């Protein structure tokens, strides 16, 4: 039998991955990092790019990736500095990467609040190796998905964030990855976020791309929340409309910690976003909200997995989406409640507003419950705007067209306003401009 | 101002209204009472233009600016812009749509249609707050989504607040008193009474005579099986409160 490696040996993507790997800043092969990269590359080549035959990838068809001739990413092409600037607030802590490299002029790492370490991953791979290695060790023995391995093999830049015990960072920590390329390229950033005991922080990760650049973004964010920590986290993805975004966010929660997460997905031609949360202690709570807005031939697939491994934990999930044109969306929400995880309270809802005539939605709740004293509810809706709501607005003098626009805006606003931080809401509203324009 | 002639209507082929005739002049308040299923709410929805109902016969002539128009020829929004208002029996919750934004959009549409200048957000804010005050509504509702997380009573007050803001010529109040405690009902009734004047008209649809002690009608009509079976002064409401509707059935 042919292994994936042999089958895909000639695929331009695989040869690009190997070229990117060879071009990495040199690391001793026997070092921790060298071994991690080598092991991850081997795993990725063994697994290959998932196909639609794989149940978990049934709706995300990445076969077109294999035909793209990816080149090394170039620095000089970037011209959208003003668009990036719109997303930056001086009083916040910002770290900007343009085509994978730190853009010092946009970043302000100068004077950081006490208790916050924020450094480039390039540096952290050496200075904070122990923290990263300890976190990765928690997943030892688990199945590692192909794109997580791809990221571990190739990521050499990104953000390392650490909040000391009992420290609350008020300012938003904003990590921006901006991409613009003339030729197809790979962008593989990683973030490691560590919150100590009873620490609290707000982190926004923004992925933006411009001018119909063709690229594959495969970011990975690893989060560790120690006991009683609180993280408000948002991932906003507004890649170029010709880009592939295959991202993973993995969250490890210790006792009494709270993960308050939001995902905005409205860019990219093909988007696949995975969020995996492991609740590893009693009393954790996890919020997984999200919004996707797609148009034209865009495709977006949100996968989440909530693994309840301890009793007395709560998880809440609301994902909403608007589909226009001939776009497709998929939602898959896994919730595992292990036998020990009694008194789990879990809620999941996916709501889709279909405005285009040629759209398709696949929504799939996937609950696997082994405990007998739990409360788990889930639901999904796919539909058009509510006739009664339209009539109500019309009866006040508002035209049907304006009513439709107001209601579709309201559908988005309703979930954006659930985000804890108003500044993040503002930024998402900027990224949502194309979605709102599609409603005009 | 309004003349309803021989109105027949139904929903999905089921007839509900079977020949309604009703004339309402400016400055008048009419009340319609009747048992459940008699067609009261259907009448209100048809006046405001709900697309689900189908009119099979008849017309609703509305006199505006010395012109007579058939309301049935207008879309719901055109009716609203001509001064028709419906206070809903079940006000609709609209998540994500801010009350002030929505009402200002509605108000300005009506201004535009009637050829008066639109109001800017600041002036409108002051205007809406003054109307909320008369209805004893907490100002926090101004920035909330329309009717979302409102109690039953707050939703009904919000309807009358919208009526106060939009200042219609002809308003239909569809069971605005149902489910209200006596204090809330008084506030709502006071709000309506303040809006009563010689240039407008109000049609009150209700189950309960109680409301009519506060909003005193000039005429009371009893609707049964899709027809008005009796019309008289306000004393008719007391009679049905006491005796029920059976004595009014056709043929008795």
Image (spheres, coloured by chain):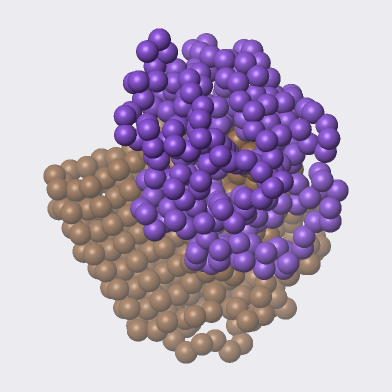
Q: From the image, state the color of chain A.
A: brown
Q: Residue at x 47, y 89 (%)?
A: A114
Estimate the x, y position of residue B146 in percent, counting from the top left: 54, 52
**Quarter occupied by residue A300:** top right
Estimate the x, y position of residue A149 in percent, counting from the top left: 45, 52
Q: B86 or A4, which is in the foreground? A: B86
Q: Residue at x 62, y 16 (%)?
A: B6
The answer to whether B181 is drawn above or below residue B36 in the figure is below
| Quadrant for the N terminus of chain A in the image | top left
| Quadrant for the C terminus of chain A in the image | top right
The answer to whether B198 is drawn above or below residue A101 in the figure is above
Q: Is residue A219 left or right of residue A129?
A: right
Q: A359 or B49, which is in the foreground? A: B49
On the question of residue B197 being in view, the answer is yes
On the question of residue A155 being in view, the answer is no
Q: From the image, state the color of chain B.
A: purple
């Amino acid at each position: 039998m042919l292994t994936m490696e042999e089958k895909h040996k000639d695929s331009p993507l695989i040869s690009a991955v190997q070229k990117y790997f060879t071009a990495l800043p040199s690391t001793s092969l026997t070092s921790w990092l060298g071994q991690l990269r080598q092991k991850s590359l081997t795993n990725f080549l063994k697994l290959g790019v998932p196909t639609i035959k794989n149940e978990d990838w049934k709706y995300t068809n990445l076969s077109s990736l294999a035909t793209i001739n990816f080149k090394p990413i170039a620095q000089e092409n970037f011209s959208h500095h003003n668009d990036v600037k719109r997303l930056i607030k001086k009083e916040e802590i910002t770290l900007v990467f343009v085509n994978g490299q730190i853009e010092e002029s946009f970043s302000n790492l100068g004077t950081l609040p006490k208790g916050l370490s924020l450094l480039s991953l390039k540096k952290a791979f050496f200075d904070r190796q122990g923290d990263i290695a300890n976190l990765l060790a928690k997943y030892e023995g688990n199945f590692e998905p192909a794109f997580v391995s791809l990221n571990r093999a190739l990521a050499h830049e990104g953000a390392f964030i650490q909040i000391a015990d009992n420290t609350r960072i008020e300012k938003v920590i904003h990590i921006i990855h901006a991409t613009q390329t003339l030729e197809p390229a790979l962008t593989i950033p990683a973030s490691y976020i560590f919150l100590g005991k009873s620490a609290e922080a707000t982190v926004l990760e923004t992925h933006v791309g411009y001018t119909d650049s063709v690229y594959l973004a495969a970011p990975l964010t690893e989060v560790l929340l120690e006991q009683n920590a609180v993280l408000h986290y948002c991932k906003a993805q507004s890649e170029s409309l010709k880009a592939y975004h295959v991202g993973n966010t993995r969250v490890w929660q210790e006792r009494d910690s709270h993960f308050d997460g939001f995902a905005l997905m409205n860019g990219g031609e093909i988007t696949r976003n995975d969020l995996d949360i492991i609740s590893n202690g009693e009393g954790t709570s996890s919020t997984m909200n999200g919004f996707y807005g797609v148009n034209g031939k865009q495709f977006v697939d949100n996968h989440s997995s909530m693994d309840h491994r301890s009793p007395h934990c709560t998880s809440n999930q609301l994902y909403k989406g608007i589909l226009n044109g001939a776009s497709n969306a998929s939602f898959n929400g896994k919730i595992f409640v292990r036998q020990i995880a009694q008194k789990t309270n879990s809620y999941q809802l996916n709501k889709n507003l279909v405005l285009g005539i040629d759209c398709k939605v696949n929504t799939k709740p996937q609950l696997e419950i082994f405990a007998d004293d739990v409360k788990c509810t889930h639901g999904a809706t796919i539909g058009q705007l509510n006739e009664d709501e339209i009539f109500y607005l019309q009866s006040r003098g508002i035209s049907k067209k304006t009513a439709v626009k107001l209601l579709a805006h309201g559908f988005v606003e309703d979930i954006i306003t659930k985000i804890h931080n108003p500044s993040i809401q503002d930024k998402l509203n900027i990224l949502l401009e194309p979605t709102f324009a599609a409603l005009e | 101002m309004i003349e309803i002639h021989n109105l027949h209507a139904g929903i999905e082929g089921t007839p509900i209204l079977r020949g309604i005739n009703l004339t309402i002049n400016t400055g008048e308040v009419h009340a319609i009472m009747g048992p459940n299923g008699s067609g009261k709410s259907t009448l209100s929805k048809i006046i405001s233009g709900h697309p689900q109902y189908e009119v099979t016969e008849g017309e609703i002539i509305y006199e505006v600016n010395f012109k007579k128009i058939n309301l049935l020829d207008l879309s719901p929004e055109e009716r609203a812009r001509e001064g028709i208002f419906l206070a809903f029996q079940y006000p609709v919750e609209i998540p994500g749509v801010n009350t002030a934004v929505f009402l200002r959009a509605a108000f300005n549409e009506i201004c535009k249609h009637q050829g008066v200048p639109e109001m800017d957000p600041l002036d409108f804010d002051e205007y809406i707050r003054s109307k909320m005050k008369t209805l004893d509504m907490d100002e926090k509702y101004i920035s909330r989504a329309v009717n979302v997380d409102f109690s039953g009573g707050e939703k009904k007050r919000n309807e009358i607040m919208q009526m106060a803001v939009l200042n219609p010529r002809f308003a239909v109040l569809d069971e605005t008193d149902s489910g209200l405690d006596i204090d809330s009902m008084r506030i709502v009734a006071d709000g309506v009474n303040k809006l009563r004047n010689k240039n407008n008209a109000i049609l009150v649809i209700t189950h309960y005579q109680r409301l009519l002690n506060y909003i005193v009608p000039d005429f009371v009509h009893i609707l049964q099986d899709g027809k008005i079976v009796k019309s008289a002064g306000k004393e008719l409401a007391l009679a049905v409160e006491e005796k029920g509707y059976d004595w009014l059935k056709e043929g008795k």
